[in-house]
Image: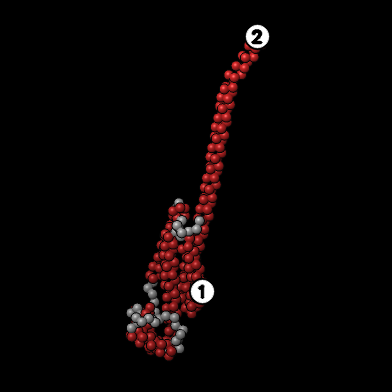
């Protein structure tokens, strides 16, 4: 075999030996490329999930802030309505003391304020949570209690004013009305009027009162036949309302600064 043939065989052998090496290198490169691609996919997935979690957290935070703002406005609205009602109760009291004849008009003017307070209370009940709703109920009850004390005083003052105006012309009738009115109240018959529980004695007292009021021309004009309340009644009712308001503020502050998941009602819409 000549040198040319030997060279050709040698070149073929070298070529055959280089094929496995080329395949091996290609496999390594392919594997490295796949690993790089997988790492890039994992990084992209982690970045996407992090961005998604950030958006979700931001959305939840914004929703919580919005819900907290809605509740805060509801709580503040009720508190303002209660304070307006309380202020008007003071007007009812002072009107009864200064000009009893105008007291019925001032009492009537309290009705829209009472309706507004009840509406605000309903909103608070809908927004919750339960501890705030319960505190709100105490506040509204205390405000109604204060107004009732003021109405009672104003009506009692008007009753005494009307009777005093008739005392000169009908002294005996006025004296008898005052006596029956005090007796009727002391025996706690007022809340039984019109009910099956009212005893026959109370019916007799009412019948006599109607006759006496008709005689002196005041039938239908007198609101209540009550004696004057003790001076402490207004103070007690006012103090009870102040305490209820303070408790309501503390309860709402606690609820608004608590974990949103803890203050949200399970039945509330998302």
Q: Nearer the viewer, residue 190 or 62?
A: 62
Specify few, some or many for label 2: CA neighbours under 10 Å numbering under 14, 14-19, or 20 or more. Answer: few
Q: Is residue 111 above or below residue 75?
A: below
**Callout 1: helix, strand or loop?**
helix
Which residue in the protein does label 1 denote?
109
Q: Position of residue 211 (x, y in %)?
A: 40, 89
Q: Position of residue 140 (x, y in %)?
A: 44, 66
* Residue at screen point 38% across, 88% down: 207
Task: Say which of marks 1 and 2 sits in front.
Answer: 2
Which residue in the protein does label 2 denote?
2
Q: Residue 47 appears in which quarter of the rendering? A: top right
Task: Report, in whole angstroms, how far the alpha carbon at label 1 lies from the one at label 2.
Answer: 130 Å
* Residue at screen point 44% across, 76% down: 154
**Callout 2: helix, strand or loop?**
loop
* Residue at screen point 57% across, 29% down: 30
Q: Position of residue 218 (x, y in %)?
A: 45, 86
Q: Residue 21 appears in which quarter of the rendering? A: top right
Specify few, some or many for label 1: CA neighbours under 10 Å numbering under 14, 14-19, or 20 or more. Answer: few
Question: Is 40 positioned to the left or the right of 181 in the image?
Answer: right
Observer able to see residue 191: yes
Q: Nearer the viewer, residue 270 or 187?
A: 270
Dot 1 or dot 2, earlier in sequence: 2
Q: Position of residue 78 (x, y in %)?
A: 49, 63
What is the number of callouts on the image? 2
């Amino acid at each position: 075999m000549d040198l040319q043939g030997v060279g050709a065989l040698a070149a073929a052998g070298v070529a055959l030996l280089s094929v496995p090496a080329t395949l091996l290198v290609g496999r390594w490169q392919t594997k490295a490329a796949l690993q790089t691609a997988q790492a890039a996919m994992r990084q992209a997935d982690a970045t996407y999930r992090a961005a998604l979690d950030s958006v979700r957290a931001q959305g939840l935070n914004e929703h919580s802030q919005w819900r907290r703002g809605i509740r805060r406005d509801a709580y503040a609205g009720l508190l303002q309505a209660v304070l307006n009602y309380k202020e008007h109760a003071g007007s009812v009291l002072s009107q009864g003391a200064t000009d009893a004849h105008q007291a019925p008009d001032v009492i009537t003017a309290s009705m829209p304020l009472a309706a507004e307070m009840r509406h605000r209370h309903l909103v608070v009940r809908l927004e919750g949570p339960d501890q705030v709703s319960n505190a709100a109920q105490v506040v509204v009850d205390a405000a109604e209690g204060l107004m009732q004390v003021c109405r009672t005083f104003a009506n009692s003052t008007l009753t005494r004013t009307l009777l005093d105006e008739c005392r000169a012309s009908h002294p005996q009738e006025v004296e008898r009305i005052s006596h029956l009115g005090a007796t009727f109240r002391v025996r706690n018959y007022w809340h039984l009027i019109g009910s099956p529980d009212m005893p026959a004695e109370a019916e007799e007292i009412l019948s006599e009162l109607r006759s006496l009021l008709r005689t002196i021309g005041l039938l239908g004009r007198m609101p209540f036949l009550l004696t004057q309340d003790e001076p402490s009644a207004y103070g007690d009712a006012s103090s009870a309302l102040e305490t209820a308001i303070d408790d309501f503020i503390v309860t709402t502050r606690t609820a608004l600064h608590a974990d949103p998941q803890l203050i949200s009602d399970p039945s509330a819409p998302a």
